[in-house]
């Protein structure tokens, strides 16, 4: 009786696996690119966690508490949009061409350095300047303010990005993101040193 049930169970499992693979469709490079862009801009943990070794993604996810992270995402993605314009794939590699629209954050680092300098020199004798934790928090707030000011202006620029991918071996694509691509997606933002 036990072997009979095992045989029935094996047949049922084989049928389930066969029908589930019959319904599996390959994800297109365009779909993978859209999933990445949507997940990145929304802070979707399932998407973002794959790219934590990237300095920019790490900045987005490890800036501070939830309130700080929320401010960062809202500022950086307030004027964000993208349009996929072309794609090509061959075997296990693909590239998607897209136009990304975002605020021009290329001057944020310079504005941050000036505002941080003003804060520090204006508070030289204040306890907060000598306390590294408090100074770090204040500098982060200044950095976020510069991002928000830039986003509030509403001026955007379009940037063409070529997003490379490789097959993940399971009917999908892994987006290959480096700091250069992330900087372009984020409107030329430079990470403060």
Image: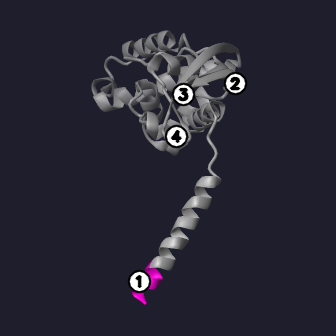
With 115 as the anchor, is 90 left or right in this view?
right
Check disc 4 and report its element: helix, strand or loop: helix
Observer-nearest of 85 and 36 = 85
Look at 54% across and 20% down and name the residue there.
Answer: 146
With 181 as the anchor, is 55 left or right in this view?
left
Look at 45% across and 33% down and name the residue there.
Answer: 51
Task: Residue under label 1, please give it.
Answer: 3
In three-dimensional space, the C-alpha distance between marks 4 and 2, rounded to whole angstroms, equals: 19 Å
What is the count of numbered marks?
A: 4
Q: Earlier in the sequence, mark 3 or mark 4?
A: 4
Q: Earlier in the sequence, mark 3 or mark 2?
A: 2
Q: Does residue 137 sit above or below 147 in this rendering?
A: below
Task: Tell me the mark number nearer the camera, choosing from 3 and 4.
Answer: 3
Q: Earlier in the sequence, mark 1 or mark 3?
A: 1
Task: Residue under label 3, please give it.
Answer: 91
* Disc 4 crowd, CA 10 A, few/some/many (<14, 14-19, 20+): some
Q: Earlier in the sequence, mark 4 or mark 2?
A: 4
Q: Does residue 159 sit above or below 81 in this rendering?
A: above
Queried whether the magenta region covers residue 140, the answer comes back as: no
Observer-nearest of 64 and 97 = 97
Point out residue 145 in the picture as x, y percentages from the top left corner. Answer: 54, 24
Q: Does residue 139 sit above or below 157 in this rendering?
A: below
Task: Residue under label 2, please give it.
Answer: 84
Q: Which residues are magenta?
A: 1-6
């Amino acid at each position: 009786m036990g072997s009979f049930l095992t045989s029935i169970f094996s047949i049922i499992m084989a049928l389930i696996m066969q029908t589930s693979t019959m319904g599996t469709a390959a994800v297109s490079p365009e779909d993978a690119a859209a999933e990445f862009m949507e997940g990145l801009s929304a802070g979707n943990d399932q998407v973002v966690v794959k790219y934590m070794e990237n300095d920019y993604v790490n900045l987005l996810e490890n800036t501070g508490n939830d309130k700080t992270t929320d401010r960062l995402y809202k500022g950086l993605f307030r004027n964000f949009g993208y349009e996929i314009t072309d794609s090509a794939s061959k075997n296990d590699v693909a590239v998607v061409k897209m136009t990304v629209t975002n605020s021009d954050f290329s001057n944020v680092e310079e504005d941050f350095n000036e505002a941080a300098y003003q804060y520090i020199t204006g508070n030289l004798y204040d306890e907060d300047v000598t306390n590294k934790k408090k100074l770090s928090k204040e500098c982060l707030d200044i950095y976020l303010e510069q991002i928000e000011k830039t986003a509030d202006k509403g001026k955007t620029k379009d940037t063409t990005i070529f997003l490379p991918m490789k097959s993940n071996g399971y009917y999908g694509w892994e987006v290959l993101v480096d700091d250069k691509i992330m900087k372009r997606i984020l409107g030329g933002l430079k990470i403060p040193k």
